[in-house]
Image (spheres, grey):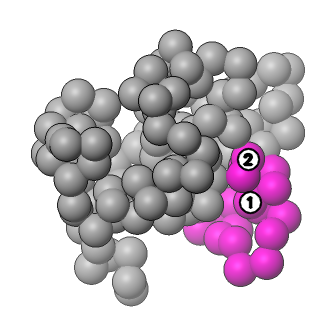
Amino acid sequence: MDLDQYLSSHNALTVSQLRERLVSLGYQVKSDAQIRQWQHQYAGRLPSPENCVGLELASDGRISRRDLRPDDWQRIWPELSTTSRNRRATDNSAIAEGTPIDGKSVREARGKFRIPKIDTRKLRE
């Protein structure tokens, strides 16, 4: 699901809530307008690879890095090209749960792919 589809879906976070969650996860997002520019791809603007990971985490996997960067995700995240689309939901839940993925621990994946550590207590508030 891309950002526009997510924000249009039932039970999605608002743009403001999504930005707040990104910031709480340690991602730098200047304003709600920046997220709207990504949503509508204004002037071809796409989120950076780092912010794509943040959007995926902030949406609990509902937004996909692959869908945010459909033309270059294989070059940015080659490890995802070996993972079928059917396994994506499993992998996202594994990241959230802290379980190993493809034989690597989440700690190894976090170091290699700059996946921030999530304080799940803040997400539940």
Residue 7 belongs to the span the image colors magenta? yes
Residue 60: x and y in percent read: 50, 64
Residue 6 figure quarter: bottom right
Q: Left or right: where does residue 116 sit relative to residue 6?
A: left
Q: Is residue 30 visible?
A: no
Dividing the picture into quadrants, the one containing residue 10 is bottom right
Report the Cα–Cα distance between label 1 and label 2: 6 Å
Measuring 44% from the left and 21% from the top, which residue is drawn there?
78
Q: Residue at x 77, y 37 (%)?
A: 37
Q: Which mark is residue 97?
A: none
Query: What type is the residue that disc 2 sits on?
Result: Asp
SS of the residue under disc 1: helix
- Give the magenta-colored segment's residue range: 1-19
Q: Is residue 22 above or below residue 16?
A: above
From the viewer's perspective, is 17 left or right of 58?
right
Picture coordinates of residue 97, whole percent (x, y): 28, 68
Q: Is residue 113 above or below residue 119?
A: above
Q: Which residue is mark 2?
A: 2
Query: Quick check: marks 1 and 2 in contact, CB under 8 Å?
Result: yes
Q: Which residue position holds label 1? A: 6
> Which quadrant would residue 113 be assigned to in this image?
top left
Q: Using the rendered image of the protein, determine whether residue 45 is visible from the camera's viewpoint.
A: yes
- Which amino acid, by three-letter code, is at mark 1? Tyr
What residue is rendered at 77% in x and 61% in y? 7
The mark tally for this picture is 2
